[in-house]
Structures are given as C-alpha cells and as structure tokens.
Amino acid sequence: MQVVHTIKEVRETVKEWRKEGLSVALVPTMGYLHEGHLSLMKAAKAGNDKVVVSVFVNPTQFGPNEDFESYPRDLDRDASLCENVGVDLVFNPEPSEMYHDDFSSFVDMNTLTGNLCGKTRPIHFRGVCTVVSKLFHIVKPDRAYFGQKDAQQLLVIKHMVEDLNEDIEIVGCPIVREEDGLAKSSRNTYLSPEERQAALVLSKAVFAGEKLVKEGEKDANKVLSEMRAIIESEPLAKIDYVQMVSQKNIEDVEVIDGPVLCAMAVYIGKTRLIDNFMI
C-alpha cells in the first residue's frame, strides 16, 4: 500500500492501473478511521480491483467556531487500518494541495442542502460538494462509497453526480453501530464517559421511531414527538434538529407515504452527533 500526498502521485498511480484495465473505487474520509469507514473500504474492495482512500480534513466544510482545528487526526493509525483491509492507495493531501492561494471555484447546490444539517451549517454542503467533486476529478473512480450515517450527504452527492453527469456509481453503505447502539463516529472520541452514556439517547430515539413507522404509523409528527421525548429525557442532550423529510427533496413531510429520511443532530455537551433511519 502506498501513502501519497500530492495530486500528481494519485493520477500517476491510477493511470498505471487503468493501463492494466483495472476498476478503481474511492472512499472519501476525513480520517481518524473507525469500523464504519472500514466497512466502506471492505465493500469497495469486494466490488473493485483497486481502492483509493482519501484522508483529508476538509477546511471548506467547517464553519466559524466549528471543530476544524480540534478534529482528531492520526495518519499512522489510519494508514495501518487501511493496509489491514487491503486498501491500495491512501491520499493524504495538505489543504494547500487541494486549495491553492487564489482558489475561488466552488460546487454549490440550491436544493437538498437548505434543510437538516444545511440549515444549521450553511456553508457545509458547498464545502462537501466541492471537495468530493475535486476528489472525483483527481481519482476518476468507477465507484465511490459513502456511509448512510451522513444520510443527507449521501443524497446530496448522488444528486450532484446526476446533475453534473459524472460517470461514477455512488454506493451507500449501512450505519455501523457500537454494541450498545451508538452510531460510530470520529467525534465520539470527544465524549467523556458520562457523555458517552448520555449519547445513547440518539440511537434509542432512532430505534423507537423506526419501529413506529414499520408498525404502520403514518403521522410524521407523532413519530417525531416520541423521538424528541426520548432525547429530552437526557439532561446532557440538546436537540439541534429532529426531522422527517422526503428522500427526494429533503423537504419536511407530515404524512409518511413514500421514501423518507428521519434524521437528527443532537449536542451531547459540546459535541454535535448525528443519527438517522431511512424507510
């Protein structure tokens, strides 16, 4: 396995693979990898000849007072995990490699991004779409793998690829959870032992809401009320949002009669965690 830091090195390596007629997968990450990321890599490895993993904490998707500087980083650990699951190339650029001094071109979207995380993090998806688009141009993968934990991101990327006629298959992979239900996240490392226990209200609310919908409840507000009550029972939890939206346009629904995404963002102490279910 190679670890490279420049766009030129990635392109040269992928060019050689293409000469051999090999298929290429991309798994974009911000590093500090966990089993959720590894599940994406394993899926990529199973469906493709070569796998590229990007490890890049992307500054353009962080707003003021967010955790860009403190976001956990450990390239040696990440590289070891990647090698253990059979990744072929790790791309770990510096921000200056991805964004030169007079960088001024962004990929923006005026649908799907104004609700949920886009409402409280207004520049977030512009940064996500821009960096993912750049990675697609650099690697030119056949397939790219994203986790359902970032469900809005997954739907946004699928829409972007369709809009821009990118010849890339976007593969969504299920949420990976701890044994007690908490969705795996690099930000879980921020939690104190007390906060870690408190964070279980997210998955408890998700499981309760999903159960109601699968049992036939069509009233979105009834489902959301039940979920909010569970979260609000925890003193350390502060709701950013808990919403039921259409998977097609990320707009709120009152009646559950098609594919929906029920998503939440909740602060546990100072740490913002997300979770969701899709029906």
Image (cartoon, helix red, strand yellow):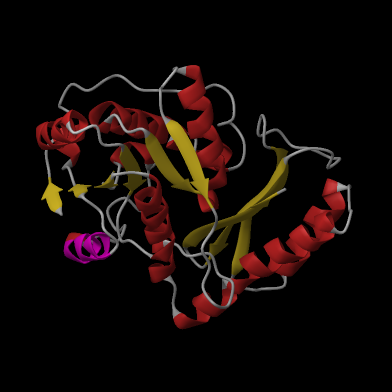
Position of 133 relative to 144 (above/below): above
Left or right of 219: which side holds 36? left
Q: Which residues are magenta?
A: 76-84
Task: Tell me where residue 63 appears, x and y as whole percent.
Answer: 39, 41
Task: Tell me where residue 206 appears, x and y as whole percent.
Answer: 69, 61
Task: Identify the residue at horizontal 35%, vertical 22% (top origin).
Answer: 106
Position of 45 relative to 34 (above/below): above
Q: Is residue 77 magenta?
A: yes
Task: Identify the residue at horizontal 12%, vertical 43% (top origin).
Answer: 5
Position of 36 relative to 134 (above/below): below
Left or right of 78: which side holds 190? right
Q: Is residue 9 magenta?
A: no
Please name whichever residue, 59 or 88, is drawn nearer the observer in this view of the structure: 88
Task: Tell me where residue 253 appears, x and y as whole percent.
Answer: 79, 38
| Type of secondary structure dominating the magenta stretch | helix
Q: Quadrant of the N terminus?
A: bottom left
Please name whichever residue, 28 or 52, is drawn nearer the observer in this view of the structure: 52
Q: Residue furthest bottom?
A: 193
How many marks overall? 0
Task: Tell me where residue 264 appears, x and y as whole percent.
Answer: 63, 53
